[in-house]
Amino acid sequence: MKKTRFHDLHKKHGAKMIEFFGWDMPVEYRGIIDEHLAVRRRAGLFDVSHMGEIHVDGPQALAFLQFLTPNDVARLAPGKVQYTALTTPEGTFVDDMLIYCLKPDAYLLVVNASNTDKDYRWVAERAASYDVRVENASDAYSQLALQGPASARILQPLTDIPLADMKPFTFLEGHAAGQDSLVSRTGYTGEDGFEIYTRRPDPSPLWTALINSGAAEGLEPVGLGARDTLRLEAKLMLYGNDIDATTTVLEADLKWIVKFKKGDFLGRDALMRQEESGLKRKIAGFELLDRGIARPHYPVFSGGDKVSEVCSGTFSPLLKKSIGLVYLPLELTVEGTEFEIAIRNQRARARVVPTPFYRRPAA
Amino acid sequence: MYPGDFYYTKDHEWVRVQGQDAVMGITDFAQKQLGDVVFVQLPEVGANLEAHQSIGTIESVKAVSDVFSPLAGEVTAVNGDLVDNPEIINQDPHGKGWIMRLKPADPKAVERLMKAAEYEKHLEGLDKET
C-alpha cells in the first residue's frame, strides 16, 4: 500500500487507518463526530497527500485545457484556482478537479486519488496534437488541508504569505514552516481554510508546526471519515459516489461550471443537446424523516417503484440527522417531495431539501 | 479491560449473568471498530429470541452492524437510554451501554460462550489477520 510522507505522524496521533484506493490513510483519530465539529467550530488538519497533481505546460496549455474541460480556463490568471471537470464526449465525468494557473503557460491539475492514473492517461493521450507537456507529479507532492474558522490564525505565524487578503480560489507561493509551499484558499469542507502543497522530500515539520501552532485554537487532526461528512454537508461532489462516467455535468447540478460560450470542448455537443431537450433527472439533496442512516446504493422508491439509488448518504454530525444525495426523475426533485428509501428490510421516508445542507455563516 | 465475570461471543457481544437473567451488550472492541454510534435499534420486550438471531442494528457514522442475541430466551428489558443517547455505547460499552436483558431458555447455555481470557486470545488472533 502507498503511504504519504506523514504516515508515521498519523500512527503517533493514534489514527485508525484504512485502505483508500491503494493508500494507507487515516480514517479517524479521536472520532468522526469530534473531528467534524472541530472543523466547523475551530480547525482541523487533513493529510490529503493522496490527491493527484498533474502539470500541463506549454504554449498551447490554455487551448488544450479549454478543450478538456467545460469551465472557462481563460478566466484564470496566475494565482487563481478554478473548480472544473474532465469531461467525456458524452458530457459525463472522467473526474472533477481544481485547476491552478501557475503562469500564463503553466497549469496544475489537482485530481482525485482514485482517478490519478486514469486522469493522467486521459490528459496525456489527448495532448499529442497540442504543443504541451503533461507530467504526473503526484508522487513528488505532499498536500495538507487546514480547514475551519481558526485556520488563518493558525497558519499566518508560520508563513510569509499574507493570508488576510487572500480571496477564496486564489493562491500564493512562499514559505510555510520554512518550506517552499503553494498555499491556496480552497478546501473540501464548506469552511474557510487553506490547502498547502509542498514538494519537500520530508514535509513532516510542516504538519508538526501546524499542530503546535493550532494547539491553543483547538486544532485537531482529521481523517477521511470526517472529510466525507464535512464535504457532504456542504454538498461538494465525490467522484464515485455522486458523479462518474454515467452522470452528466448538468444532471449533477453543476451547470455553473459549464461555459458553452467559450467554444468547443469535450462533451459540449452532448451537454447542449441535453440542455435543449431538458433534463430527465437531476441530483437532489434529501433528509431522512424516519430513524436510520441512508447509505450509498440503498434503493430509492417512489409510488412503489424503484426509481434510483442513494449516491452519498451519511449521518450529519452538525444537523444530527441522516442526509444524502440521490439522482431523481426531475419531477421528484421539487423541495418537499417525499419518497422512500429501503434500509435493509424496512422503508424509511425521506424528503427533498434545499442544498447545501450546511452553509457557513458570513464572516 | 474485559471483565472476568462476563461471557463473550465471536461476534463481540458480552453477557453478564444476574440471578435468573442475562444482560448483554457489545464489547469495547466492537464499539471501537464501529466508531461514533448514532442509532441503536432495540428488540421488543417479550420477544422470544433464538441464539444468534439478529436483534437489530447499530449504526455508527461510518458503518452499520448487526447485533445478535448470544443466547436463546425471552427479552425482559431493553436499555431505552440508547434511543436518545446512543453514544453511551462508546462511553461505557460494558456498563451503562447494555442493550437488553433476557431470561435464557437454557440457564447453562451461557457457559458455552467464551471467558474473558479466551475472548482476549480471540482478539489477538484478529489483530494478526489485519
Image (tube, coloured by chain):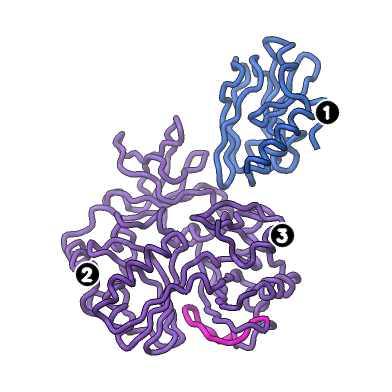
Residue found farthest to the right: B4
Instruction: Using the image, tell me which numbered label, if any, was put on residue A13.
Output: 3
Residue ID for mark 2: A268
Chain seen in blue: B
- Subunit ID for the residue under disc 1: B
Specify the principal SS of the magenta part: loop
The colour one sees for chain A in the rendered image is: purple
Residue A328 placement (x, y as % from top left) = 31, 49
How far, Cα to Cα, is label 3 from label 1? 31 Å
Subunit under mark 3: A
Same chain for labels 3 and 1? Say yes or no: no
* Residue at 69% from the left image edge and 30% from the top image edge: B25
Q: Residue B117 in the image: x percent, y percent?
A: 79, 29
Nearer to us: label 1 or label 2: 1
Residue A32, placed above or below residue A40:
above
What is the distance, in whole Å, between disc 3 and disc 2 at their CAs?
47 Å
* Badge 3 element: loop
Tell me which segment is drawn in magenta: A163-177
